[in-house]
Image (tube, helix red, strand yellow):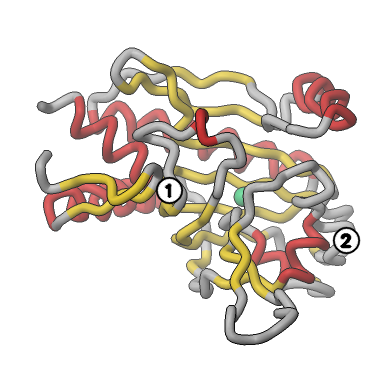
Amino acid sequence: MNDMGYKSPGELYYGSDVGTVISAIDDLIIEKMKEKSIDFTQEYFPILLRKETLSKTGYLKRGNKDCIYVYNPDIKNPNIEYVLTPSACFHIYEKYEHFNFDKEKVFTLKQHVFRDEINDEWRDEIRLRDYQIREIVFFGSKSYVEIIRTKLIDVAESVMEELNIPYSIKLSTDSFVHPIMKRYQQVQIEKKSKYELIIKYFGKEVAVASFNLHDRAFTGPFDINVNQIKTYSGCVGFGLERIALCYLKERV
Ligand SMILES: [Zn+2]
């Protein structure tokens, strides 16, 4: 494992051995999605996200202060227009704004995401500033998004079994900083809107994937619809470095 190290807290670098494991885990997720007959389309996006899109997602309103903004220091009063995307699914909502799909849809993408935790004490070996997510985003009726999420939990379970990593699936909430959002955490529990895939890393529980139902939080503001159906969305993200680190740790 000397193929890997940290340049600064949260900034992981690695060589081809770890890189190969990350790619293999990503391939395995895709393979298991095919096995579970999930009909998906692959998409590719840049890492820069327009600030305007970020605002529209409600990410900042939910009290998140961990974004890394991009600006040119040579320009006085820089007009910050871009952010390094903090979530993998935001480009999908931007791309399909005002779109009407003719049938229910599942998309997948691999995306680098960026989080600059405000509280440095949170930072540990596995909480990275820059990491890759295999993301799956789905649109359809309420029952459709629930079915796809359940299938993706099955995918996660069979990936863990194949990698021989002990795991559990737990009901969870987003960790909001803002006190007003504490009420929202209760709603998330009542609606079972977030599950996490938990594995142990040096005795500590870490979430390596999350399975989310968004209700109409994105399909509403971005006006994304499936023909004739009241449209809901959900997303699932697998943290590829985290899974790889846990996998490798089991083998040292
Ligand atoms: Zn997402």
Q: Is residue 18 left or right of residue 81?
A: left
Q: How many marks?
A: 2
Horizontal arrangement in the rendering, residue 244 relative to residue 146 (left or right): left
The residue drawn where x is 45% and y is 23% is 198
Instruction: From this view, report whether residue 197 is shown above or below residue 58.
Output: above
Residue with the mark numbered 1: 33
Where is residue 240 drawn, in percent x and y? 37, 46
Q: Secondary structure at mark 2?
A: loop
For label 1, the crowd category at 10 Å Cα-Cα, with few meaning under 14, some 14 to 19 and many 20 or more, is some
At label 2, counting other C-alpha atoms closer than 10 Å, the crowd grade (few under 14, some 14-19, many 20 or more) is some
Distance from the alpha carbon under mark 2 to that under mark 1: 29 Å
Horizontally, is 75 left or right of 4 in the view?
A: right
Left-right relation of 58 to 125: right
Could you tell me if residue 165 is visible in this image? yes
Residue 95 visible to an observer of this rendering: no
Residue type at tag 1: Met
The dot on residue 221 is 2
Residue at (36% x, 50% y) in the render: 11
Q: Secondary structure at mark 1?
A: helix
Find residue 168 and report its horizontal and vertical position in percent. 45, 18
